[in-house]
């Protein structure tokens, strides 16, 4: 990135494949369908030479949100997997192959997945195996199967194993009855056998086998049909997916809260809004319709996260809900701890919503109230933060099995911290619950 613009260079070693794909018309067709991010060739001197001189410089549009597959909802990872397979099938028709199947080659524009790696495309070689098969399974298929067949949310495991879930480990988790499926046997159990000691010879021999193009297409099509059918297990734990219809608000209070968010978004008109603890996305949707350009949500409950994504996709919202815990967000990781940036570091936002949130951080997770507020205010120059009093049923539920040691958790303290960091533009009291919404602008 340079001055807010996104560039990619094509080195001499990649020129032949790049020109073949460009001249075939494949890249243009994929871009027109919205499957591939747009690219414009710009003068080579746009990007300074660092080492080997580059042959081409491509400029891409900048997406509002950068996300990683371990932060996606189940249906988002599924949509990204289907996009990868659709692109590979379309590419084969043009004599082109994808050199890998990395899930990090997909980003989201709102709730729409888009492929971003132009240099993954190369000429197809007659009879070759799909080189990306194992990577596709580890980064797409296996996480989906973990949730669909074992009822385990994939995000925590995936975040801890950045390159995906190995087949040998997944095979240990799946119920025995699932392993008798021909598909699981082919894509998981057989792959797991290649990881055993002395399996290198088998893997090397398999890699030398020829796979006719028709067979490759059939395998990709079968994999696509299988993934399209997958759904999260009903046994997957989810606490908050029904919160929007089961909470301590009365209907008039919910109306007041939506109107307050609407006024805020219409006045601030943020290019990107961050909704922390977004649940199913109710208030992100309100803000987007009132003037926000795009929204990204953080939600740690997998069921609520799925519902938020499906809602965004159904309604065509520029809203991407991500799996994220405000007390333990995705850290910087990978090579030198910076290959994948932390979730907060990637969020360049103009406004933040912290609704029905701070009691979970301050009481359930023992973060001092001032620290919670400073962290929220640091996220964006303007926002709405909701104070939930101790008398609220949700707070009482958090306190039912523990002593109330939270002396600084009080509305006066809440307002004092906000006033020390900026201007309180407007407040809104929810009369029945006693909750207070505060719209701030940071100094």
Image (spheres, rainbow, N blue to C red):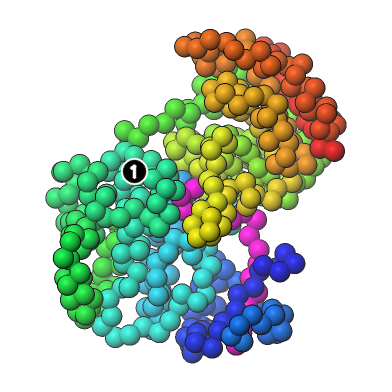
Neighbor class of circle 1 (other Cα within 10 Å; few <14, some 14-19, many 20+) is: many
Q: Residue at x 26, y 50 (%)?
A: 169
Residue 293: give x, y in percent of width and height: 70, 50
Image: magenta residue range: 54-72
Visible residue check, residue 316: no
User: Residue 126 falls in which quadrant of the image?
Assistant: bottom left
Q: Residue at x 57, y 16 (%)?
A: 395
- Was residue 26 drawn as part of the magenta stretch in this picture? no
**Image quarter in which the C terminus is found:** top right
Taking 238 as reference, is 211 above or below it? Answer: below
SS under mark 1: helix
Taking 406 as reference, is 384 above or below it? Answer: below
142 vs 109, left or right, is left
Residue 17: give x, y in percent of width and height: 47, 86
Q: Between residue 32 and residue 322, name the one nearer to us.
A: 322
Residue identified by numbered label 1: 147
382 vs 62, left or right, is right
User: Residue 369 falls in which quadrant of the image?
Assistant: top right
**Image quarter in which the N terminus is found:** bottom right
Q: Residue at x 66, y 82 (%)?
A: 49
Residue 342: give x, y in percent of width and height: 57, 50
9 vs 139, left or right, is right
């Amino acid at each position: 990135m340079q001055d807010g613009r996104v560039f990619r260079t094509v080195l001499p070693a990649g020129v032949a494949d790049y020109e073949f794909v460009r001249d075939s018309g494949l890249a243009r067709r994929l871009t027109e369908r919205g499957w591939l991010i747009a690219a414009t060739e710009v003068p080579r001197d746009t990007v300074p030479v660092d080492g080997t001189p580059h042959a081409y410089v491509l400029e891409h549009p900048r997406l509002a949100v950068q996300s990683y597959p371990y932060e996606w909802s189940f249906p988002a990872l599924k949509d990204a997997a289907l996009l990868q397979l659709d692109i590979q099938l379309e590419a084969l028709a043009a004599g082109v192959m994808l050199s890998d199947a990395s899930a990090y080659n997909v980003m989201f524009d709102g709730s729409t997945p888009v492929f971003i790696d132009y240099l993954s495309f190369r000429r197809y070689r007659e009879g070759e195996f799909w080189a990306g098969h194992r990577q596709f399974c580890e980064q797409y298929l296996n996480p989906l199967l973990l949730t669909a067949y074992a009822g385990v949310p994939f995000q925590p495991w995936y975040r801890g194993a950045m390159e995906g879930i190995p087949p040998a480990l997944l095979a240990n988790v799946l119920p025995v009855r699932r392993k008798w499926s021909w598909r699981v046997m082919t894509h998981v159990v057989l792959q797991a056998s290649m990881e055993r000691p002395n399996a290198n010879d088998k893997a090397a021999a398999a890699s030398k086998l020829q796979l006719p193009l028709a067979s490759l297409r059939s395998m990709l099509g079968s994999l696509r049909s299988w993934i399209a059918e997958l759904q999260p297990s009903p046994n997957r734990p989810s606490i908050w997916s029904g919160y929007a219809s089961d909470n301590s608000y009365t209907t008039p209070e919910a109306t007041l809260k939506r109107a307050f968010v609407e006024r805020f978004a219409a006045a601030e008109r943020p290019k990107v809004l961050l909704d922390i603890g977004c649940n199913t996305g109710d208030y992100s949707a309100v803000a987007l319709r009132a003037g926000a350009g795009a929204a990204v949500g953080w939600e740690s409950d997998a069921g609520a996260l799925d519902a938020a994504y499906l809602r965004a996709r159904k309604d065509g919202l520029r809203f991407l809900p991500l799996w994220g815990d405000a007390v333990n967000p995705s850290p910087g990781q990978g090579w030198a701890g910076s290959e994948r940036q932390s979730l907060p570091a990637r969020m360049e936002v103009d406004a933040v919503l912290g609704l029905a949130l701070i009691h979970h951080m301050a009481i359930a997770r023992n973060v001092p109230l001032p620290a919670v507020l400073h962290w929220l205010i640091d996220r964006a120059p303007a926002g709405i933060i909701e104070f939930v009093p101790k008398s609220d049923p949700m707070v009482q539920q958090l306190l039912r099995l523990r002593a109330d040691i939270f002396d600084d958790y009080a509305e006066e303290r809440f307002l004092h911290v906000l006033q020390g960091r900026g201007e309180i533009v407007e407040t809104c009291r929810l009369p029945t619950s006693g909750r207070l919404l505060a719209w701030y602008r940071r100094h």
